[in-house]
Image (cartoon, rainbow, N blue to C red):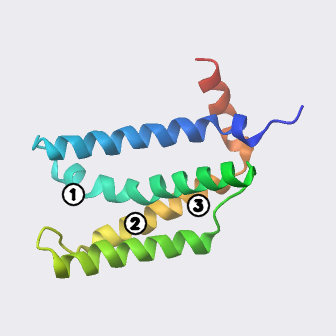
Amino acid sequence: MVTSPTKFSMFRKVLYFTLLIVALTIYVMQRLKIPLPALINNYINDLLYVPLVLGAIEYIIQRLKKDDYFKLPLGFIIFLSCSYSFYFEYYLPKINSRYTGDWIDVLLYFVGGLAFFIIGNTKRKVFKKADKEIESL
């Protein structure tokens, strides 16, 4: 029996939505002015931002192309990380005092992109056990 990548990637779907919920929770807490530890308040969403955007882009392209095997190339992941780094850490701080440029954020954009690439291109058997455990719930 051939397992479709859509069915096989249950672990990746659960991971994506867990990270999305974490990012949205942090965002809402920040908007409500609920105090958060500095590490969470200043850096976690920067780490999650690029993988969440890449995951959404990859999913949309897979649906549009009707190709469950489509993966974003490393060049695009690097391009997106560079674009966000430039826009959020260089351009916006120059035109809006609400934003500050931070090299740690730049590093986190690239770490998030690299994590997305590695997880997205890891051999399926690595996730097979996790997929079975998730499906048994």
Residue 111 lies, in percent from the top left, at 44, 64
Q: CA distance from mark 1 to mark 3?
A: 24 Å
The amino acid on which the numbered mark 1 sits, given as a three-letter code, is Asn
Residue 27 showing in the rendered view = yes
Residue under the point 47% across and 56% down = 53
Residue at mark 2 = 109
| Element marked by disc 3 | helix
Residue at mark 1 = 42
Residue at mark 3 = 117
Label 3 environment density (alpha carbons within 10 Å; few <14, some 14–19, many ≥20): some
Residue under the point 67% across and 32% down = 129
N-terminal of the two: label 2 or label 1?
1
Label 2 environment density (alpha carbons within 10 Å; few <14, some 14–19, many ≥20): many
Label 1 environment density (alpha carbons within 10 Å; few <14, some 14–19, many ≥20): few
Q: Are marks 2 and 1 in contact (CB under 8 Å)?
A: no
Residue 23 lies, in percent from the top left, at 33, 45
Q: Which mark is residue 57?
A: none
Q: CA distance from mark 2 to mark 1?
A: 13 Å
Q: Does residue 48 appear to the left or right of 34 in the view shown?
A: right
Residue under the point 67% across and 48% down = 63
